[in-house]
Image (tube, coloured by chain):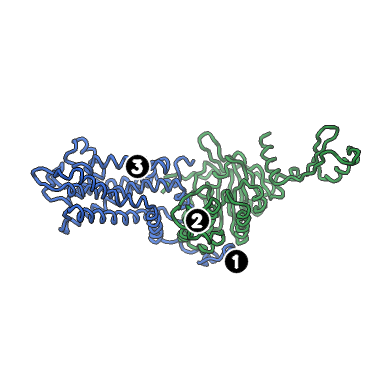
Amino acid sequence: MSTTDRVATGSTTATAATTGRGRLPGLAPLALVRAGLELRQFWRERDAVIFVFAYPIVMLAIFSSVFGAEDQGTDVAQIGFAQYFLPGMVATGIVLTSFQSLAVSIAMERDDGTLRRLRATPLPAAAYVGGKVLLTLATSVAQTALLLAVAALAFDVPLPTDPGRWATFAWVFVLGSATGTICGVGFSSLPRSGRSASAVVTPVVLVLQFISGVFFAFFALPGWMQTLASVFPLKWIAQGMRSVFLPEDMAALETSGSWQHPATAAVLVAWLIVGLVVGVRTFRWRRRDDG
Amino acid sequence: MTSTTTPSPAPPPPAPRGHAGRPPSAAGSPGAAVRVRGLRKRYGAKQAVDGLDLDLATGEIVAVLGPNGAGKTTTIEILEGFRDRDAGEVRVLGEDPARGGRAWRARLGVVAQDAHDQAELSVAESVRSTARYYPAPRDPDEVVDAVGLTAKAGARVRSLSGGQRRRLDVALGVVGHPELLFLDEPTTGFDPQARRTFWDLVLRLRDAGTTILLTTHDLAEAAHLADRVAVVRDGRVVAEGTPETLGGPDARTPLVTWTADGVRHAERTDAPTALAAHLMASVAGADGEVADLCITRPSLEDVYLGLLTTEDDR
């Protein structure tokens, strides 16, 4: 009972409450607090952890086994299936971890009252989003590292040794993740409820995977499909990753005949800006049906 | 981050309405914790809040009573800054909630209805992390202890019972050391003992200077906790006063009922004993008994239900 009395009579770790309010915590420490919570909660949802880490690897394994006998390419270059599809799996992993996970998890947190509760505290929205960004960064780095390790060790995919290629990998990875994260925050306001979030977000990602050269060789897709895919980020992330993991002369198989790094950066930055504007304008703390 | 527009401040209502029972200290005093005048909010065809006035003096507990759909939660959510208002003047801790920033929110505590978030965190993690959002929080472990969850401190939130979950909500609402605490139906799902413990906690918070706005369906809770009670119906305060004086003296007048010659009689009187003595002399049977004689003093619940019925009949 003595503790209860102390709480009620105003015992504080900081005595500022009686002597005037203390300073509000800064944005960076708050984002780190949030990131710690996000990681802990993510790690405790075992099914999600397994999905995020295993999906790209399982897909790579399935496609390599099914089409393993067929070499991909033309007379220009012949490489194994696993190597051709590894960049697509890296790209799809980035989009799943950033865009899909965030769009679904924020919609669910809007539904279960997390956002409403945070809104009632002095936590700034930017710290909440910052926590999500750090979570995304941590999970996609771990996921991609695991995928590359499995591809190299189990499927004998040669990984690049040229530092320039890893530099390309780094900027495509960071820009792709950032764009996916911001678009995920923006897209999270679309589903009506947390329960419908998965059903709304998953098909979008699935269709993009099929038309963006993740499951099928991009050069083999119909022209209209290639054009459609070129509007969305996944095609460009996959193409950027192909420029990292495929031999240089495979660039001839791209629709433009080159890796198009400037165009890749431009499209991803454009989506980043669109996602930011839409996200800031449409972000809601409460459910849509909530008055 | 919200795209909401800030409503322009509406002109004050033409004349103060002056509810009976409002202490002069609260009315319009600059130190008032909450001041609401002419609040209006419409959802489509439904006028959820329709000219509501409310005052909370610093350091008092005010209970807002009313049937479901009366506009209680909408009003509270406007005061918390969650919702825009259509019209009316609102001041919470001296600021307009529609423009309240981080420093303002740091002075509020909110215990909302039906949250089921943070399922994967432990009780202690949940309270400790929330404390870190505030400039001058209470000690999280002491708060967990105060709501009686020390034994559950390491348990995942999703494993808590309904009443434990609700006590966690309260812990999260007070850990920031708020000056003003909103409790929206806080004891729903509590067993009687937990409810009593919770009441003690609320009273100690008040004694430590916390102003508390409470909504409840539990009339005993309002009678036990509240310094003042406001009854809301159809988006307006229809009665206001201390739990002892709510509804005015007429609503408190004892009721004497009896049966004479097969007819049921009822009479309100301030002198029930005299009436009983008179009945004994005039209508008592051979055995000296007045048939079905009953003297009742209206409880807060009777007064409350009477207020709602009066409104129906109007």
Label 3 element class: helix
Judge whether residue B60 can be spotted in this image. Answer: no
Residue that numbered label 2 is attached to? B104
Residue drawn at x 24%, y 50% as measured from the top left:
A90
Amino acid residing under circle 2: Trp
Q: Residue furthest top?
A: B262
Residue A201 has which mark?
3
Q: Nearer the viewer, residue B309 or B153?
A: B153
What hue represents chain A? Answer: blue
Residue drawn at x 33%, y 53% as measured from the top left:
A136
Q: What x and y, as percent, mark residue A12?
A: 53, 65
Proximity of marks 2 and 3: CB atoms separated by less than 8 Å: no
Q: What x and y, as percent, mark residue A203?
A: 32, 40
| B57 shown above or below A12 | above
Residue drawn at x 67%, y 44% as measured from the top left:
B239
Where does the N terminus of chain A fall, quadrant-wise?
Answer: bottom right
The total of numbered circles placed on residues is 3
Q: What x and y, as percent, mark residue B303?
A: 70, 43
Amino acid residing under circle 1: Ser
Disc 1 and disc 3: Cα gap in Å? 51 Å
Instruction: Classify 10 Å Cα crowding around label 3: few (below 14), some (14-19), many (20 and above).
Output: many
Residue that numbered label 1 is attached to? A2
Circle 2 or circle 1, nearest the eye? 1
Disc 2 and disc 1: Cα gap in Å? 30 Å
Circle 2 or circle 3, nearest the eye? 3
Label 1 element class: helix
Instruction: Classify 10 Å Cα crowding around label 1: few (below 14), some (14-19), many (20 and above).
Output: few
Label 2 element class: helix
What hue represents chain B? Answer: green
Residue B296 has which mark?
none
